[in-house]
Structure formats: C-alpha cells, structure tokens
Amino acid sequence: MKESIGSLHEVKTACPDEATLAEYAGGAMTQWQRERLEEHASACAACLENIRAAQTAERMLAEGALADTGESLKNKAKGLAKMDTGKRRFRSYIWLAATIAAFTLSFTVPKYFAQFLAAAVILGLKWVSESEGIRTLIVSMDAKRRHEEEHEEMPKWRR
Amino acid sequence: MDPNEHPEELIQGCIRKDRRSWDVFVETYSRVVYWAIRDRLKRYGYDFSEEDVNDIHQDVFIALWASDRLKQLREHGKAAGWLAMVAGNAAIDHFRKVKRQSPPNSISIYEEIYRTGDGESRTLEEVLPSGADRPDRQAQLNEAREELEAALDGLNPKERMAVKLNLLHGMKHAEIAAALKVPVNTVSTTIARAKKNLKEKLEKKRLL
C-alpha cells in the first residue's frame, strides 16, 4: 500500500495499516492520533481510496446491497477451517518416508524389485493425494511471511 | 450468532479457530471481500478475470485464517470496512507481485469518476464540461489536477480530505461526513468553497 495514485503530493510517511484506518473510521482514536492520520491521508490517494472502500462496504452491507458470492467460493473459504495443517503435514511425511523406503528397498532387495517399485508408486500416489492442500499451505506460509514483513515496516501510529 | 449484534464474539471465535464462528464469518463477509476485490481492480484499471477474483478471494481468507490476520482488527464493529481495505490491497498486491503488473493507468480514478460518477460525485464533469471531447483531454485532466492541488493549499488536512474524497474518489457529502466524523453542512461548505476556488483558477488558466 505504498502507491500514491492520483496524488501529486509525494507521501513521505508510510501508510497506516487497515486496522488503524478502521479505528479512524470507528472514531476510536484520540484527537492527536486523528490529526496525524489526516495529515498523511490528505496527501495520500491510496489511504483515501481505502477510506472510500471501507465506508462504501459498511454502507452496502448494512443496506443488503452486496450480491452473494455463491456456495462454491464460500465453501472453499470455509474449508480452510477443516484443514488441520499440522496433522496433515505429519501424515504426508509418513507417506513420503514410506515411498522413499519402498523405492530404496526395490534396489537393495533385487529379488522383489518389481514389487517394491510398485509399492513405491502406490505410496507415492498416496503422498501426492494427502498433499492436495499443498498449494494452500504454501500460500498460507507466504501470507504469513508477508504479513510479518509488513508488520516490521509499519510505523507506530498508535503511541 | 448474529454477526451484527455480536461482532466481537464472532471475531474472537475465529481467532480461537472455532469452526462454527468461521462458517458464520465467511457466510457474512465473503460478499464484502468479493466486492472489494472487483471494486479496487476496476478503479485501478486492471484487466482481470473471474478466476483472478476467486484466487484473491481465497488468498484473503487464507491470510485471515492461517496467518491470524484477524488479530490485527481492533475495531470489531468495523469488520466490513477493514475487510474491504484488506481485500482491496490484496488485489493490488496480487497483480503487482504474482502477475507483475503495475496499475495500468495512473489517473484511472479520475477517468472512472469522469465517465461513470453519479450524483454529487460528478464533479470533474462539472468543472471540465467543455473539455470532454478535446484530443488533449489527458493533459487537460493533469493540469486540472495540479490546479486542484493548488486550490487545496489553503485548507487544513481534514478539509483537504473532504474535498479529495468528493472530487477525486467520488464519495457523497453524507458519506464523507460519516467517515470524517464531521457535520454534513461543514463538508458541503468546504467542498463548495474549494470548487469555487478551483473553478476560478481553471478559468484563469482558460481550462474552462
């Protein structure tokens, strides 16, 4: 949120985060905090755009003017809660370890090469199927990392 | 659980990873996230698909659930507004970082208002009526923008916000008053004064 689209004034200070802008909208800040934020936002198109979006969303939701998103999209989001990432990852590692073991055994025990290789393939497929949420996991970790980075960059608006 | 009556309870439930709370939260706010993503991408002039919107929608909810982003929210009664900002910014981040695309048009906000603004927000049309068909409209808009900034110099930050939210971001007087926590009359007076000042400057420069 560092851009200053539409504004000729260069914004010198970093933007307040969304939670701070929500506090501003909710009137929860002290006069001094409000004035500091206004000083920044009055020269920052990105913050003004956030304020507009927040105000419009609150109004439209209250008026029932926002269209429903459909079950598929909602179910996908709800499904995140069903994903116990720790347990899933552990189970996934077990299948991976079994796959590696079967693959290794297929070479160390030549007599049962084909059997162990087939077992490695089956276990490997099981590992892949258990890892179906892998993209979600990667995105989650990336989101977490970005959130931590953003948090470090954030100015202390609330003092 | 009614999210409007008990926003605090709902948010705390989601933070505790309570699945029922999460279901209610998604049911209530999915539409806000979806709207905010589309709104922001449209206003910044991005060419986007339904798939882009769905991906960003899911990424926002992943950040809320897996990264505990909800812990940041301090004003629980303003969850919809906060989410709209988070989703809008996530949409821009997605296009910048994943698709490596900067906003296509740096004055898209002005263009949007110029074309489709309604009611009180149609202010650039008001101040630039004769220039609508000029071939150098882009230059005309840029010059008008510079003059607007100059016209705003004498205002305090709150007044400047009010004028910009109206002239550049298309908000109505009542919405601005609610956002800035000031009386509507004050907003209307400030905007009328700024418009008059701007009009004089534009006329002097023969932009009108």
Image (cartoon, rainbow, N blue to C red):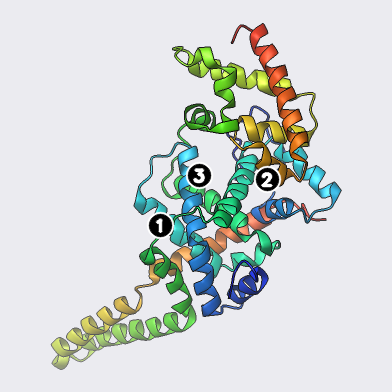
Left or right placement of residue B122 versus residue B181 in this view: left
Per the image, label 1 sits on a secondary structure element best described as helix
Left or right placement of residue A69 versus residue B71 in this view: left
Q: Look at 35% across and 84% down and name the residue there.
A: A97
Residue B65, percent across and down?
A: 53, 69
Neighbor class of circle 2 (other Cα within 10 Å; few <14, some 14-19, many 20+) is: many
Q: Amino acid at mark 2?
A: Cys
| Residue at image mark 2 | A15
Per the image, label 3 sits on a secondary structure element best described as helix
Foreground pick, B96 / A120: B96
| CA–CA distance in space, label 2 to label 1 | 26 Å
**Numbered disc 1: what chain?**
B
Q: Looking at the rendered structure, which numbered label has been put on residue B40?
A: 3
Residue A58, percent across and down?
A: 60, 53
Q: Share a chain, discs 2 and 1?
A: no
Q: Amino acid at mark 3?
A: Arg
| CA–CA distance in space, label 3 to label 1 | 15 Å
Foreground pick, B97 / A104: B97
| Residue at image mark 1 | B55
**Numbered disc 3: what chain?**
B
Per the image, label 2 sits on a secondary structure element best described as loop
| CA–CA distance in space, label 3 to label 2 | 17 Å
Left or right placement of residue A97 versus residue B205 in this view: left
B138 above or below B5?
above
**Numbered disc 2: what chain?**
A
Q: Look at 65% across and 67% down and name the residue there.
A: B71
Q: Looking at the image, tell me whether mark 3 or mark 1 is earlier in sequence order.
A: 3
Neighbor class of circle 1 (other Cα within 10 Å; few <14, some 14-19, many 20+) is: few
Quarter of the image for the N terminus of chain B: give it. bottom right
Q: Amino acid at mark 1?
A: Asp
